[in-house]
Amino acid sequence: MVENKSHIEEVLRNVTDPEIPVLTIQELGIYQGFESEGDKITVLITPTYTGCPAMDMITVNVKSAMEDAGYKNVVVKLVLSPIWTTDMISQEGHRKLKEYGIAPPVEKTTDSSFLSGEEKVVPCPQCESKNTQLISQFGSTACKALYKCNDCLEPFDYFKCY
């Protein structure tokens, strides 16, 4: 049995997302904990969506961080429950997204604006203007949409609600 659980948590607290390197896997809400049996440590993570290409790199980063900390027998397991939603992004994660230039999700859980026909108001992370417009449902990654601020004219990614 692994004896230093707080050390393992500290190591995992510093693993970042490869697509948004200012966010840790804990701030993103995909880290679900770890289990230990003997010297084997199983780190549990939930994918943001099925087929997310970043999960392979996150697995590599988790194993590398754990190995650098002296833990050699580490397995990363993808768990599908609970299902990840943008509600799992921490408040710190929201703050860091905005500082990084990505508008954080403005709604809870799922985006239902397409049902009502109402456009959501996504504030610009640069100037905070609400005079923004959707350019494309697809931004720099599949989990982001591309917006433009009509006041400062800057394009920006918006982290879509899931």
Image (cartoon, grey):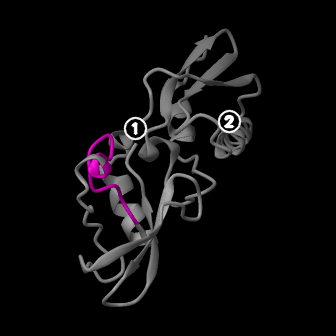
Among all residues in the image, which is located at the extreme bottom?
Answer: 152
Residue plotted at (58% across, 51% down): 17
The residue shown at (69%, 16%) is 40
- Identify the magenta region: 103-114
Residue 127, percent across and down? 30, 83
Closer to us: 19 or 4: 19
Residue bearing mark 2? 66
| Secondary structure under the numbered disc 2 in the rendered image | helix
Quarter of the picture holding the N terminus: top right
Q: Is residue 123 above or below residue 69?
A: below
Q: Quadrant of residue 50?
A: top right
Please name the amino acid that badge 1 sits on. Answer: Thr
The one nearer the camera, 99 or 147, is 147
Q: Specify the principal SS of the magenta part.
A: loop
Which of these two is toward me, 151 or 46? 151
Q: Is residue 144 above or below residue 152?
A: above
Instruction: Categorize mark 2 by other alpha carbons within 10 Å: few (<14), some (14-19), many (20+).
Output: many
Furthest-right residue in this view:
72
Image coordinates of residue 60 in percent, x first then y, are 74, 40
Dividing the image into 4 quarters, which one contains the C terminus? top left
Closer to us: 1 or 90: 90
Q: Nearer the viewer, mark 2 or mark 1?
A: 1
Residue 112 in magenta? yes
Q: Secondary structure at mark 1?
A: loop
Q: Position of residue 100 (x, y in %)?
A: 45, 70
Give the residue at mark 1: 85
Mark 2 or 1 closer to N-term?
2
- Looking at numbered disc 2 in the image, what kind of residue is underneath it? Met
